[in-house]
Amino acid sequence: MIRRVLPHGMGRGLLTRRPGTRRGGFSLDWDGKVSEIKKKIKSILPGRSCDLLQDTSHLPPEHSDVVIVGGGVLGLSVAYWLKKLESRRGAIRVLVVERDHTYSQASTGLSVGGICQQFSLPENIQLSLFSASFLRNINSVSFRSFCLHTGVPGRSRCSSPGPPVQPLGLPLAGFRKGCCSHGEQRESAEEGAKVSLMSPDQLRNKFPWINTEGVALASYGMEDEGWFDPWCLLQGLRRKVQSLGVLFCQGEVTRFVSSSQRMLTTDDKAVVLKRIHEVHVKMDRSLEYQPVECAIVINAAGAWSAQIAALAGVGEGPPGTLQGTKLPVEPRKRYVYVWHCPQGPGLETPLVADTSGAYFRREGLGSNYLGGRSPTEEEPDPANLEVDHDFFQDKVWPHLALRVPAFETLKVQSAWAGYYDYNTFDQNGVVGPHPLVVNMYFATGFSGHGLQQAPGIGRAVAEMVLKGRFQTIDLSPFLFTRFYLGEKIQENNII
Protein backbone atom coordinates (compact mmCIF):
# COMPACT_ATOMS: atom_id res chain seq x y z
CA MET A 1 0.00 0.00 0.00
CA ILE A 2 1.50 3.36 -0.98
CA ARG A 3 1.44 6.01 1.69
CA ARG A 4 2.85 9.51 1.65
CA VAL A 5 5.78 9.54 4.12
CA LEU A 6 6.66 12.72 6.02
CA PRO A 7 9.40 13.47 8.57
CA HIS A 8 8.46 12.91 12.20
CA GLY A 9 6.45 15.78 13.61
CA MET A 10 5.11 17.06 10.30
CA GLY A 11 1.34 16.71 9.79
CA ARG A 12 -0.52 15.86 6.57
CA GLY A 13 -2.20 19.25 6.73
CA LEU A 14 0.91 20.80 5.24
CA LEU A 15 0.21 18.95 1.97
CA THR A 16 -3.00 20.86 1.47
CA ARG A 17 -2.03 24.23 2.91
CA ARG A 18 -1.34 26.80 0.22
CA PRO A 19 1.95 28.75 0.19
CA GLY A 20 1.61 32.12 1.84
CA THR A 21 -0.91 31.11 4.54
CA ARG A 22 0.05 31.79 8.14
CA ARG A 23 0.27 29.38 11.04
CA GLY A 24 1.58 30.35 14.48
CA GLY A 25 2.71 33.70 13.15
CA PHE A 26 4.92 32.28 10.42
CA SER A 27 4.36 32.24 6.64
CA LEU A 28 4.48 28.79 5.01
CA ASP A 29 6.26 28.34 1.68
CA TRP A 30 5.94 24.58 1.24
CA ASP A 31 8.23 24.20 -1.79
CA GLY A 32 10.95 26.23 -0.10
CA LYS A 33 10.58 24.39 3.23
CA VAL A 34 10.95 21.00 1.53
CA SER A 35 14.28 22.04 0.07
CA GLU A 36 15.49 23.39 3.44
CA ILE A 37 14.39 20.27 5.33
CA LYS A 38 16.18 17.99 2.88
CA LYS A 39 19.39 19.97 3.28
CA LYS A 40 19.18 19.82 7.09
CA ILE A 41 18.54 16.06 7.11
CA LYS A 42 21.40 15.51 4.68
CA SER A 43 23.75 17.54 6.88
CA ILE A 44 22.80 15.43 9.91
CA LEU A 45 23.29 12.17 7.99
CA PRO A 46 26.39 12.82 5.84
CA GLY A 47 27.02 10.44 2.96
CA ARG A 48 23.42 9.21 2.86
CA SER A 49 20.82 10.23 0.28
CA CYS A 50 17.62 11.70 1.60
CA ASP A 51 14.54 9.74 0.54
CA LEU A 52 12.38 10.41 3.59
CA LEU A 53 10.35 12.92 1.65
CA GLN A 54 8.92 10.82 -1.16
CA ASP A 55 7.71 12.42 -4.37
CA THR A 56 4.03 11.50 -4.64
CA SER A 57 3.22 13.49 -7.77
CA HIS A 58 3.08 10.28 -9.83
CA LEU A 59 0.36 8.77 -7.63
CA PRO A 60 -3.33 8.89 -8.47
CA PRO A 61 -5.55 10.85 -6.09
CA GLU A 62 -7.25 9.03 -3.24
CA HIS A 63 -10.66 10.21 -4.52
CA SER A 64 -11.99 10.82 -8.02
CA ASP A 65 -15.55 11.20 -9.30
CA VAL A 66 -14.76 9.34 -12.53
CA VAL A 67 -11.96 6.86 -13.24
CA ILE A 68 -11.34 6.20 -16.93
CA VAL A 69 -9.45 2.95 -17.58
CA GLY A 70 -7.53 3.50 -20.80
CA GLY A 71 -5.82 6.66 -22.01
CA GLY A 72 -6.19 6.18 -25.77
CA VAL A 73 -8.31 8.44 -27.98
CA LEU A 74 -11.60 6.89 -26.80
CA GLY A 75 -10.78 7.37 -23.11
CA LEU A 76 -9.49 10.89 -23.72
CA SER A 77 -12.59 11.76 -25.72
CA VAL A 78 -14.82 10.69 -22.82
CA ALA A 79 -12.70 12.79 -20.46
CA TYR A 80 -12.92 15.79 -22.78
CA TRP A 81 -16.71 15.69 -23.06
CA LEU A 82 -17.20 15.08 -19.33
CA LYS A 83 -15.33 18.31 -18.66
CA LYS A 84 -16.95 20.25 -21.51
CA LEU A 85 -20.47 19.23 -20.49
CA GLU A 86 -20.09 19.55 -16.72
CA SER A 87 -22.45 22.06 -15.12
CA ARG A 88 -19.67 24.25 -13.75
CA ARG A 89 -15.89 24.33 -14.14
CA GLY A 90 -14.19 21.84 -11.83
CA ALA A 91 -17.43 20.16 -10.76
CA ILE A 92 -16.23 16.70 -11.81
CA ARG A 93 -12.87 15.22 -10.87
CA VAL A 94 -11.70 12.90 -13.67
CA LEU A 95 -8.74 10.51 -13.52
CA VAL A 96 -7.36 8.70 -16.59
CA VAL A 97 -5.34 5.55 -15.87
CA GLU A 98 -3.05 4.37 -18.70
CA ARG A 99 -0.57 1.56 -18.18
CA ASP A 100 1.78 2.60 -21.02
CA HIS A 101 2.58 6.29 -21.22
CA THR A 102 4.58 5.68 -24.43
CA TYR A 103 1.50 4.23 -26.18
CA SER A 104 3.87 1.83 -27.97
CA GLN A 105 1.22 -0.89 -28.24
CA ALA A 106 -1.88 1.29 -28.13
CA SER A 107 -4.31 0.93 -31.03
CA THR A 108 -4.51 4.70 -31.50
CA GLY A 109 -0.90 5.34 -32.55
CA LEU A 110 -0.73 2.21 -34.71
CA SER A 111 -3.88 3.00 -36.67
CA VAL A 112 -4.01 3.90 -40.37
CA GLY A 113 -6.10 6.93 -39.40
CA GLY A 114 -8.84 6.62 -42.00
CA ILE A 115 -12.20 8.32 -41.72
CA CYS A 116 -15.31 7.58 -43.81
CA GLN A 117 -19.09 7.67 -43.64
CA GLN A 118 -19.83 4.78 -45.98
CA PHE A 119 -21.41 2.43 -43.45
CA SER A 120 -24.68 0.52 -43.58
CA LEU A 121 -25.78 1.34 -40.00
CA PRO A 122 -27.24 4.83 -39.47
CA GLU A 123 -25.51 5.07 -36.05
CA ASN A 124 -22.07 4.46 -37.58
CA ILE A 125 -22.71 7.06 -40.28
CA GLN A 126 -23.85 9.62 -37.72
CA LEU A 127 -20.81 8.96 -35.52
CA SER A 128 -18.42 9.48 -38.43
CA LEU A 129 -20.20 12.63 -39.58
CA PHE A 130 -19.96 14.02 -36.04
CA SER A 131 -16.25 13.20 -35.94
CA ALA A 132 -15.59 14.81 -39.33
CA SER A 133 -17.23 18.01 -38.12
CA PHE A 134 -15.26 17.84 -34.87
CA LEU A 135 -11.95 17.44 -36.71
CA ARG A 136 -12.79 20.13 -39.24
CA ASN A 137 -13.50 22.64 -36.47
CA ILE A 138 -10.87 21.44 -34.04
CA ASN A 139 -9.08 24.79 -33.85
CA SER A 140 -12.23 26.39 -32.50
CA VAL A 141 -11.77 24.36 -29.31
CA SER A 142 -8.03 25.15 -29.14
CA PHE A 143 -6.46 21.77 -29.81
CA ARG A 144 -3.20 23.50 -30.49
CA SER A 145 -1.18 20.35 -31.09
CA PHE A 146 -3.44 18.64 -33.62
CA CYS A 147 -2.24 18.53 -37.20
CA LEU A 148 -3.56 16.98 -40.35
CA HIS A 149 -1.02 15.30 -42.60
CA THR A 150 -0.06 11.92 -43.98
CA GLY A 151 2.87 10.81 -41.83
CA VAL A 152 3.04 7.10 -41.06
CA PRO A 153 0.86 6.45 -37.99
CA GLY A 154 2.93 5.20 -35.12
CA ARG A 155 6.12 6.33 -36.86
CA SER A 156 5.97 10.10 -37.32
CA ARG A 157 5.36 12.22 -34.24
CA CYS A 158 4.29 15.84 -34.21
CA SER A 159 5.88 17.40 -31.13
CA SER A 160 5.04 20.99 -32.01
CA PRO A 161 1.73 22.65 -32.71
CA GLY A 162 0.44 21.64 -36.11
CA PRO A 163 -0.89 23.74 -38.96
CA PRO A 164 -4.50 24.88 -39.07
CA VAL A 165 -6.77 21.93 -39.64
CA GLN A 166 -7.93 21.65 -43.24
CA PRO A 167 -11.32 20.19 -44.26
CA LEU A 168 -11.24 16.43 -44.71
CA GLY A 169 -11.88 16.06 -48.42
CA LEU A 170 -9.92 12.94 -49.33
CA PRO A 171 -12.38 10.37 -50.68
CA LEU A 172 -12.83 6.67 -50.22
CA ALA A 173 -13.74 4.33 -53.09
CA GLY A 174 -15.38 1.09 -52.01
CA PHE A 175 -15.86 -1.79 -54.41
CA ARG A 176 -18.65 -4.29 -53.92
CA LYS A 177 -19.75 -7.23 -56.05
CA GLY A 178 -23.47 -7.37 -56.76
CA CYS A 179 -26.04 -4.69 -56.10
CA CYS A 180 -26.09 -4.45 -52.29
CA SER A 181 -24.07 -1.23 -52.44
CA HIS A 182 -27.06 0.65 -53.84
CA GLY A 183 -28.94 0.20 -50.58
CA GLU A 184 -25.88 0.87 -48.42
CA GLN A 185 -25.03 4.12 -50.19
CA ARG A 186 -28.68 5.22 -50.20
CA GLU A 187 -28.58 4.86 -46.41
CA SER A 188 -25.40 6.95 -46.29
CA ALA A 189 -26.99 9.67 -48.39
CA GLU A 190 -30.15 9.70 -46.27
CA GLU A 191 -28.05 10.26 -43.15
CA GLY A 192 -26.28 13.24 -44.72
CA ALA A 193 -23.09 11.67 -46.09
CA LYS A 194 -22.14 12.92 -49.54
CA VAL A 195 -21.32 9.97 -51.80
CA SER A 196 -21.45 9.38 -55.52
CA LEU A 197 -22.17 5.99 -57.11
CA MET A 198 -20.00 5.22 -60.13
CA SER A 199 -20.30 2.60 -62.84
CA PRO A 200 -17.18 0.69 -63.95
CA ASP A 201 -16.84 3.00 -66.99
CA GLN A 202 -17.12 6.11 -64.83
CA LEU A 203 -14.60 4.63 -62.43
CA ARG A 204 -12.07 3.98 -65.22
CA ASN A 205 -12.50 7.51 -66.56
CA LYS A 206 -11.80 9.08 -63.17
CA PHE A 207 -9.06 6.65 -62.07
CA PRO A 208 -7.38 5.15 -65.17
CA TRP A 209 -4.99 3.12 -63.00
CA ILE A 210 -7.81 0.92 -61.65
CA ASN A 211 -8.63 -2.48 -63.11
CA THR A 212 -12.42 -2.72 -62.88
CA GLU A 213 -12.59 -6.48 -63.36
CA GLY A 214 -15.24 -7.93 -61.02
CA VAL A 215 -16.52 -4.48 -60.04
CA ALA A 216 -20.24 -3.87 -60.41
CA LEU A 217 -20.35 -0.51 -58.63
CA ALA A 218 -18.06 1.94 -56.87
CA SER A 219 -18.94 4.52 -54.22
CA TYR A 220 -16.96 7.72 -54.05
CA GLY A 221 -16.85 9.93 -50.98
CA MET A 222 -17.34 13.53 -52.01
CA GLU A 223 -16.66 15.17 -48.63
CA ASP A 224 -15.27 14.54 -45.13
CA GLU A 225 -13.45 11.31 -45.97
CA GLY A 226 -9.76 10.51 -46.07
CA TRP A 227 -7.21 10.17 -43.29
CA PHE A 228 -5.51 12.11 -40.50
CA ASP A 229 -2.62 11.62 -38.07
CA PRO A 230 -3.87 9.61 -35.05
CA TRP A 231 -0.83 10.45 -32.93
CA CYS A 232 -1.44 14.17 -33.27
CA LEU A 233 -5.10 13.76 -32.32
CA LEU A 234 -4.06 11.70 -29.28
CA GLN A 235 -1.57 14.33 -28.11
CA GLY A 236 -3.96 17.19 -28.84
CA LEU A 237 -6.71 15.58 -26.78
CA ARG A 238 -4.32 14.74 -23.96
CA ARG A 239 -3.04 18.30 -23.68
CA LYS A 240 -6.52 19.71 -23.93
CA VAL A 241 -8.02 17.58 -21.16
CA GLN A 242 -5.04 18.33 -18.93
CA SER A 243 -5.76 22.03 -19.40
CA LEU A 244 -9.35 21.27 -18.32
CA GLY A 245 -8.12 19.71 -15.07
CA VAL A 246 -8.17 16.00 -15.94
CA LEU A 247 -5.61 14.00 -13.92
CA PHE A 248 -3.38 11.27 -15.37
CA CYS A 249 -1.71 8.27 -13.82
CA GLN A 250 0.58 5.64 -15.32
CA GLY A 251 -0.45 2.35 -13.78
CA GLU A 252 -2.56 -0.77 -14.16
CA VAL A 253 -6.00 -1.38 -12.71
CA THR A 254 -5.78 -4.68 -10.83
CA ARG A 255 -8.91 -4.77 -8.66
CA PHE A 256 -12.31 -3.24 -8.02
CA VAL A 257 -13.87 -3.10 -4.56
CA SER A 258 -17.64 -3.39 -4.93
CA SER A 259 -20.81 -3.71 -2.91
CA SER A 260 -23.67 -6.03 -3.90
CA GLN A 261 -27.43 -5.83 -3.56
CA ARG A 262 -29.85 -8.65 -4.31
CA MET A 263 -32.94 -7.55 -6.26
CA LEU A 264 -36.02 -9.19 -7.76
CA THR A 265 -37.12 -8.47 -11.33
CA THR A 266 -40.76 -7.90 -12.32
CA ASP A 267 -41.09 -11.64 -13.02
CA ASP A 268 -39.63 -12.52 -9.58
CA LYS A 269 -36.17 -13.54 -10.83
CA ALA A 270 -33.28 -12.73 -8.52
CA VAL A 271 -30.43 -10.56 -9.81
CA VAL A 272 -27.42 -9.13 -8.04
CA LEU A 273 -26.58 -5.49 -8.65
CA LYS A 274 -23.02 -4.34 -8.04
CA ARG A 275 -21.58 -0.91 -7.48
CA ILE A 276 -17.85 -0.17 -7.66
CA HIS A 277 -16.57 1.97 -4.79
CA GLU A 278 -12.82 1.70 -5.15
CA VAL A 279 -10.28 1.11 -7.92
CA HIS A 280 -6.85 -0.31 -7.13
CA VAL A 281 -4.13 1.11 -9.37
CA LYS A 282 -0.78 -0.71 -9.36
CA MET A 283 2.13 1.57 -9.99
CA ASP A 284 4.47 0.99 -12.92
CA ARG A 285 7.39 -1.34 -12.07
CA SER A 286 6.12 -1.78 -8.53
CA LEU A 287 4.12 -4.25 -6.47
CA GLU A 288 2.47 -1.44 -4.56
CA TYR A 289 -0.94 -0.03 -5.39
CA GLN A 290 -3.01 3.04 -4.64
CA PRO A 291 -6.73 2.73 -3.84
CA VAL A 292 -8.91 5.37 -5.50
CA GLU A 293 -12.45 5.91 -4.26
CA CYS A 294 -14.79 6.74 -7.14
CA ALA A 295 -18.40 7.07 -8.24
CA ILE A 296 -18.11 6.09 -11.93
CA VAL A 297 -15.76 3.80 -13.89
CA ILE A 298 -15.39 4.12 -17.68
CA ASN A 299 -14.03 0.98 -19.37
CA ALA A 300 -12.13 2.31 -22.39
CA ALA A 301 -9.33 -0.26 -22.21
CA GLY A 302 -9.59 -1.24 -25.87
CA ALA A 303 -8.38 -4.73 -26.72
CA TRP A 304 -8.03 -5.48 -23.00
CA SER A 305 -11.46 -4.16 -21.95
CA ALA A 306 -12.87 -7.68 -21.36
CA GLN A 307 -10.19 -8.25 -18.70
CA ILE A 308 -11.18 -5.02 -16.97
CA ALA A 309 -14.85 -6.01 -17.15
CA ALA A 310 -14.06 -9.42 -15.63
CA LEU A 311 -12.33 -7.70 -12.68
CA ALA A 312 -15.69 -6.07 -11.93
CA GLY A 313 -17.48 -9.43 -12.03
CA VAL A 314 -18.97 -9.05 -15.51
CA GLY A 315 -19.80 -12.51 -16.86
CA GLU A 316 -19.12 -14.48 -13.68
CA GLY A 317 -22.69 -15.82 -13.31
CA PRO A 318 -24.31 -18.96 -14.77
CA PRO A 319 -24.10 -19.32 -18.60
CA GLY A 320 -27.18 -18.10 -20.43
CA THR A 321 -28.04 -15.50 -17.81
CA LEU A 322 -27.49 -11.76 -17.86
CA GLN A 323 -25.12 -12.20 -14.93
CA GLY A 324 -23.14 -14.78 -16.91
CA THR A 325 -22.89 -12.69 -20.09
CA LYS A 326 -19.29 -11.71 -20.78
CA LEU A 327 -18.02 -8.68 -22.67
CA PRO A 328 -17.20 -10.28 -26.05
CA VAL A 329 -14.16 -8.14 -26.87
CA GLU A 330 -10.70 -9.56 -27.54
CA PRO A 331 -7.41 -8.40 -29.08
CA ARG A 332 -7.03 -9.15 -32.79
CA LYS A 333 -3.70 -8.45 -34.47
CA ARG A 334 -3.70 -6.57 -37.77
CA TYR A 335 -0.75 -5.79 -40.05
CA VAL A 336 -0.04 -2.52 -41.88
CA TYR A 337 2.53 -2.52 -44.69
CA VAL A 338 4.29 0.43 -46.33
CA TRP A 339 5.52 0.04 -49.90
CA HIS A 340 7.13 2.09 -52.65
CA CYS A 341 5.92 2.11 -56.25
CA PRO A 342 7.18 4.88 -58.60
CA GLN A 343 4.58 3.99 -61.25
CA GLY A 344 1.73 3.88 -58.73
CA PRO A 345 -1.43 6.05 -58.58
CA GLY A 346 -0.98 9.81 -58.31
CA LEU A 347 -1.87 12.45 -55.76
CA GLU A 348 -5.61 12.15 -56.38
CA THR A 349 -5.60 8.59 -55.02
CA PRO A 350 -8.35 8.04 -52.43
CA LEU A 351 -8.40 5.53 -49.61
CA VAL A 352 -9.42 2.45 -51.57
CA ALA A 353 -11.27 -0.56 -50.14
CA ASP A 354 -11.34 -3.51 -52.54
CA THR A 355 -13.92 -6.30 -52.86
CA SER A 356 -11.32 -8.69 -51.41
CA GLY A 357 -11.01 -6.69 -48.20
CA ALA A 358 -7.60 -5.32 -49.14
CA TYR A 359 -7.20 -1.55 -48.75
CA PHE A 360 -4.56 1.08 -49.44
CA ARG A 361 -3.89 4.81 -49.51
CA ARG A 362 -1.04 7.12 -50.42
CA GLU A 363 1.57 7.89 -47.78
CA GLY A 364 3.14 11.29 -48.33
CA LEU A 365 4.37 12.61 -51.69
CA GLY A 366 7.14 10.14 -52.56
CA SER A 367 5.24 7.36 -54.35
CA ASN A 368 4.76 5.54 -51.07
CA TYR A 369 1.60 3.72 -50.03
CA LEU A 370 0.33 1.86 -47.02
CA GLY A 371 -2.35 -0.73 -46.59
CA GLY A 372 -3.26 -4.23 -45.53
CA ARG A 373 -6.09 -6.72 -45.19
CA SER A 374 -7.88 -8.46 -42.35
CA PRO A 375 -7.29 -12.23 -42.31
CA THR A 376 -10.17 -14.33 -43.60
CA GLU A 377 -8.90 -17.67 -42.30
CA GLU A 378 -6.72 -18.21 -39.24
CA GLU A 379 -6.26 -15.27 -36.88
CA PRO A 380 -2.63 -14.39 -36.05
CA ASP A 381 -1.39 -14.87 -32.48
CA PRO A 382 -2.10 -11.64 -30.54
CA ALA A 383 0.51 -12.43 -27.87
CA ASN A 384 2.97 -10.06 -29.57
CA LEU A 385 3.14 -7.45 -32.32
CA GLU A 386 5.55 -9.24 -34.64
CA VAL A 387 4.75 -8.80 -38.34
CA ASP A 388 4.14 -11.72 -40.69
CA HIS A 389 5.70 -10.60 -43.99
CA ASP A 390 4.52 -13.74 -45.77
CA PHE A 391 0.95 -12.60 -45.13
CA PHE A 392 1.53 -9.61 -47.40
CA GLN A 393 3.15 -11.74 -50.09
CA ASP A 394 0.44 -14.42 -50.06
CA LYS A 395 -2.77 -12.66 -48.95
CA VAL A 396 -2.46 -8.95 -49.68
CA TRP A 397 -0.18 -8.28 -52.66
CA PRO A 398 -2.06 -10.52 -55.18
CA HIS A 399 -5.27 -8.54 -54.60
CA LEU A 400 -3.48 -5.20 -54.79
CA ALA A 401 -1.75 -6.15 -58.04
CA LEU A 402 -5.03 -7.32 -59.56
CA ARG A 403 -6.83 -4.07 -58.71
CA VAL A 404 -3.87 -1.76 -59.52
CA PRO A 405 -1.59 -3.39 -62.14
CA ALA A 406 1.21 -0.92 -61.35
CA PHE A 407 1.50 -2.56 -57.90
CA GLU A 408 2.94 -5.70 -59.52
CA THR A 409 6.37 -4.06 -59.13
CA LEU A 410 5.93 -2.58 -55.65
CA LYS A 411 8.63 -2.99 -52.99
CA VAL A 412 7.72 -3.25 -49.31
CA GLN A 413 9.66 -0.73 -47.22
CA SER A 414 8.42 -1.38 -43.68
CA ALA A 415 5.53 -2.77 -41.66
CA TRP A 416 4.00 -2.78 -38.21
CA ALA A 417 1.19 -4.49 -36.32
CA GLY A 418 -1.52 -3.13 -34.06
CA TYR A 419 -4.58 -4.34 -32.17
CA TYR A 420 -8.27 -4.20 -32.94
CA ASP A 421 -10.57 -4.23 -29.90
CA TYR A 422 -12.55 -6.87 -31.74
CA ASN A 423 -16.18 -7.46 -30.80
CA THR A 424 -16.69 -11.14 -31.62
CA PHE A 425 -20.50 -10.78 -31.38
CA ASP A 426 -21.23 -8.31 -34.19
CA GLN A 427 -18.05 -6.21 -34.68
CA ASN A 428 -19.78 -3.04 -33.46
CA GLY A 429 -19.06 -0.87 -30.47
CA VAL A 430 -20.22 -1.26 -26.88
CA VAL A 431 -21.39 2.06 -25.44
CA GLY A 432 -23.12 2.95 -22.19
CA PRO A 433 -23.70 1.35 -18.78
CA HIS A 434 -23.58 -2.28 -17.75
CA PRO A 435 -27.05 -3.40 -16.61
CA LEU A 436 -25.82 -5.09 -13.40
CA VAL A 437 -22.52 -3.33 -12.56
CA VAL A 438 -24.48 -0.14 -12.44
CA ASN A 439 -21.64 2.40 -12.38
CA MET A 440 -19.38 0.84 -15.04
CA TYR A 441 -19.76 2.36 -18.52
CA PHE A 442 -18.27 1.05 -21.77
CA ALA A 443 -16.55 2.74 -24.70
CA THR A 444 -14.97 -0.20 -26.49
CA GLY A 445 -15.33 -3.01 -29.04
CA PHE A 446 -15.35 -0.95 -32.24
CA SER A 447 -13.32 -3.52 -34.19
CA GLY A 448 -11.17 -1.05 -36.10
CA HIS A 449 -13.39 2.02 -36.49
CA GLY A 450 -13.20 3.40 -32.94
CA LEU A 451 -10.54 6.00 -33.72
CA GLN A 452 -12.52 7.75 -36.44
CA GLN A 453 -15.68 7.72 -34.31
CA ALA A 454 -14.05 8.65 -30.99
CA PRO A 455 -15.36 12.25 -30.75
CA GLY A 456 -18.98 11.11 -31.08
CA ILE A 457 -18.52 8.08 -28.82
CA GLY A 458 -16.94 10.19 -26.10
CA ARG A 459 -19.80 12.65 -26.17
CA ALA A 460 -22.39 9.85 -26.08
CA VAL A 461 -20.82 8.25 -22.98
CA ALA A 462 -20.49 11.63 -21.25
CA GLU A 463 -24.16 12.37 -21.95
CA MET A 464 -25.20 9.01 -20.52
CA VAL A 465 -23.11 9.62 -17.37
CA LEU A 466 -24.24 13.22 -16.83
CA LYS A 467 -27.79 13.20 -18.23
CA GLY A 468 -28.77 9.53 -17.98
CA ARG A 469 -29.52 9.21 -21.70
CA PHE A 470 -28.04 9.66 -25.18
CA GLN A 471 -28.83 13.09 -26.58
CA THR A 472 -26.72 13.97 -29.64
CA ILE A 473 -26.74 10.50 -31.26
CA ASP A 474 -28.96 7.68 -30.02
CA LEU A 475 -26.59 4.74 -29.56
CA SER A 476 -29.12 2.49 -27.80
CA PRO A 477 -28.42 -0.36 -30.29
CA PHE A 478 -24.84 -0.43 -28.95
CA LEU A 479 -25.83 -1.15 -25.33
CA PHE A 480 -24.37 -4.20 -23.54
CA THR A 481 -27.78 -5.88 -23.10
CA ARG A 482 -27.83 -6.95 -26.76
CA PHE A 483 -25.29 -9.68 -25.99
CA TYR A 484 -27.67 -11.32 -23.52
CA LEU A 485 -30.70 -10.84 -25.80
CA GLY A 486 -28.83 -12.14 -28.85
CA GLU A 487 -29.70 -9.04 -30.89
CA LYS A 488 -26.87 -8.50 -33.35
CA ILE A 489 -26.61 -5.20 -35.20
CA GLN A 490 -25.17 -5.99 -38.60
CA GLU A 491 -22.67 -3.62 -40.21
CA ASN A 492 -21.79 -4.60 -43.79
CA ASN A 493 -18.88 -2.24 -44.32
CA ILE A 494 -16.18 -3.29 -41.84
CA ILE A 495 -12.61 -3.40 -43.17
Image (tube, helix red, strand yellow):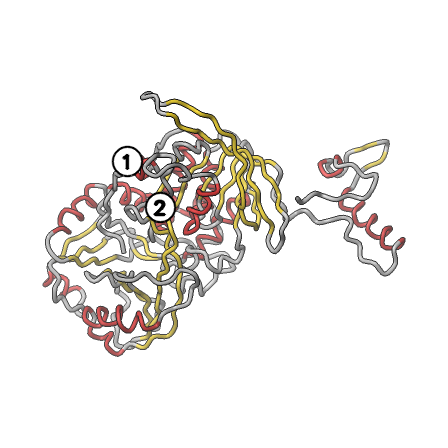
How many marks can you see? 2
- Above-or-below relation of 480 to 468: below
Residue 332 appears left or right of 282: left
Query: Going 30% across and 57% down the picture, which residue do you hit?
Result: 226
| Residue positioned most to the front | 318
- Residue tagged by mark 1? 485
Residue 273 appears left or right of 217: right
Q: Position of residue 104 (x, y in %)?
A: 48, 60
- Indicate the quadrant containing the C terminus: top left, top right, bottom left or bottom right: bottom left
Dot 1 amino acid type = Leu
Q: Can residue 420 be seen here?
A: yes
Label 2 to label 1: alpha-carbon separation = 14 Å
How crowded pointer 2 is (Cα within 10 Å; few <14, some 14-19, many 20+) is rated as some
Q: Can residue 475 be seen here?
A: no
Dot 2 amino acid type = Pro
Q: Nearer the viewer, residue 257 or 74?
A: 257
Q: Nearer the viewer, residue 293 or 212?
A: 293
- Residue tagged by mark 2? 328
- The quarter of the picture where residue 192 lies is top left
Residue 58 appears left or right of 302: right
Q: Which mark is residue 466?
A: none
- Above-or-below relation of 40 to 376: above
Of callouts 2 and 1, the N-terminal one = 2
Q: Secondary structure at mark 1?
A: helix
How crowded pointer 1 is (Cα within 10 Å; few <14, some 14-19, many 20+) is rated as few
Q: Position of residue 11 (x, y in %)?
A: 78, 36
Query: Going 23% across and 53% down the picture, which residue do you hit?
Result: 222
- The quarter of the picture where residue 268 lies is top left
- The quarter of the picture where residue 299 lies is top left
- Above-or-below relation of 295 to 457: above
